[in-house]
Image (spheres, grey):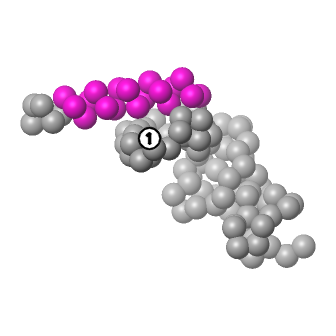
Amino acid sequence: MNYPVDRTGKRYGSLVARFPQRNYTPGQGVLWYCLCDCGRWVVRRITRRMKSCGCGRVHHRKQTRNQELLTLADAGTGYAELSTRFGIAISRVWCIVQRERKRRRLEKESPA
Ligand SMILES: [Zn+2]
């Protein structure tokens, strides 16, 4: 079977694309099985912004991720979907959203 782009072995941050999902819908992009440096497998669509499975190797990028998470949550994305998308537990998603909202409120109240 031919895939639009062969990304086997390509590295995206901590993730390395290993093999594509066998059944894919043309035009919807191929899902790839990716192995993270931490040893976790994730299945996702390859994007340039892909960094890791969501593990601790991205500590310094956490703030960016949290902002993205909050933006999506504010846009109405469900916690379950956020959990899947960011590779973190739903309870964690909830905590992050609560914390970031509080932080944002505080920042508004007391401009630096
Ligand atoms: Zn990882």
Visible residue check, residue 68: no
Q: Is residue 34 left or right of residue 14?
A: right
Q: Would residue 4 be counted in the magenta stretch?
A: no
Residue 28, picture quadrant:
bottom right
Looking at the image, which residue sits at the far right?
1
From the viewer's perspective, is residue 112 above or below residue 10? above
- 51 vs 106, left or right, is right
Q: Quadrant of the N terminus?
A: bottom right
Label total for image:
1
Q: Is residue 5 above or below residue 72?
A: below
* Residue drawn at point x = 41 percent, y = 31 percent: 97
- Residue kind at label 1, given as amino acid type: Ala
Image coordinates of residue 93 in percent, x first then y, are 50, 30
| Residue 11 placement (x, y as % from top left) | 64, 58
Circle 1 residue: 73
On whether residue 91 falls in the magenta region, the answer is yes
Residue 81 position, x and y percent, is 59, 41
Front residue of 70 and 51:
70
Q: Disc 1 on helix, strand or loop? A: helix
- Residues in magenta, as a range: 89-106
Mark yes or no: residue 77 visible: yes
Badge 1, how many Cα within 10 Å: few under 14, some, many 20+? some
